[in-house]
Image (cartoon, rainbow, N blue to C red):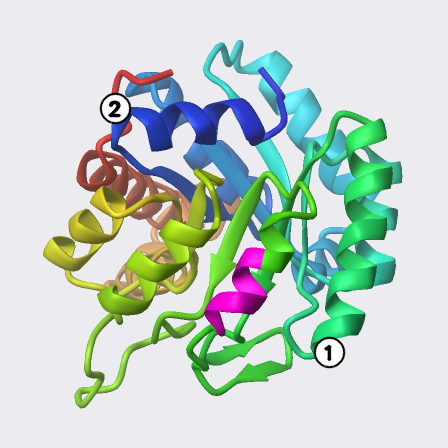
Amino acid sequence: MLVSAKDMLQKARAEGYGVAQININNLEWIKAVLSTVQELNSPVILGVSEGAAKYMGGYENVMAMVTALDKAMKITVPVAVHLDHGTYEGAFKAIRAGFTSVMFDGSHYPFEENLKKTKEVVAVAHACGVSVEAEVGSIGGEEDGVIGLGEVADIEECRIIAETGVDLFAAGIGNIHGKYPANWPGLRFDVLENVAKVTNGVPLVLHGGTGIPADQIKKAISLGIAKINVNTELQLAFAAATREYILAGKDLESKGFDPRKLLDPGYKAMKKVVAEKLEMFGSVNKA
């Protein structure tokens, strides 16, 4: 059931759990996520970076794949299709293609330009029933060539951006994309508490969910985080399971080279990670 992210995240914020945004990269990713959330009766957000959309044949093809699978698999839980770290131009393209939610990441612009562009995206998206995520303070690490240094968000800027009517809000609180280094100091809960105070109940987003300890995730949810993004962990699980299959020589046995067999261990490994995240975030049976 394809919906915007607004209602599912407001419910999550009010009831004190988190909704997983699982980034998708191909057919196996979409099937793994949809089958698992249906089994566990959990809402979910399918995250699509601009790079992943290009890889999968464009925004329209992503929506065609998700829509067809949602119908074929008889999915009844709420599913949002969300542009992750979208550019200004990309946000409008995703809306035209039928995405139900978009993130406009203007964190690298001067603040006034971020504010102006966010307002424009919100106006168009809301006219189409599409939810919008904005960001203040870039998230650390690298994603699709965008490199952030893990800035801590300015609280006054958070307040102003939240007043534009965005439906979900990401603020840099020391989180980073990809693997966390051994010397990572942890999330800045003092900053998160202040962000929550000035954003008037807007559901908050935690980027870089891979590698953050469960106790920090749960504390963040208690402070207003309603959406946690997960990407790297599924990629690592998929790669490890595929490597194990090939190193064991199973691709050389009978028709083990058939992509349906070759990709199945990775598919199952991803389902396991998704299930673990849904349990950790508390969204099981919240659909």
Residue 252 position within the rendered picture, expressed as x and y whole percent measured from the top left: 38, 58
Predominant SS along the magenta part:
helix
The location of residue 142, given as percent across then percent down, is: 52, 80
Image quarter of the C terminus: top left
In space, the residues marked 1 and 2 are separated at their CA atoms by 37 Å
Q: Quadrant of residue 16?
A: top left
Where 111 falls versus 231 (above or below)?
below
| Residue under the point 49% across and 10% down | 76
Which circle marks residue 190 in the picture? none
Residue at image coords 16%, 59%: 216
Name the one closer to the observer, 140 or 210.
140
The answer to whether residue 174 is magenta is: no
Q: Position of residue 190 (x, y in %)?
A: 25, 67
Q: Residue furthest left?
A: 215
> In this orientation, does residue 197 appear?
yes
Q: Is residue 156 left or right of residue 109?
A: left
In the image, the segment drawn in magenta is 154-159
Position above or below: 72 against 81: above
| Badge nearest the viewer, 1 or 2 | 1
Q: Is residue 176 above or below residue 58?
A: below
From the viewer's side, name the closer residue of 165 and 172: 165
Going by the numbered disc 2, the residue's amino acid type is: Val
Q: Return the mark for residue 284.
A: 2
In percent of width and height, residue 262 lies at: 43, 50
Q: Identify the mark at residue 109; answer none if there is no mark.
A: 1
Q: Which residue is painted at 18% across and 41% down in the image?
A: 280
Which amino acid lies under the numbered mark 1 shown in the image of this protein? Tyr
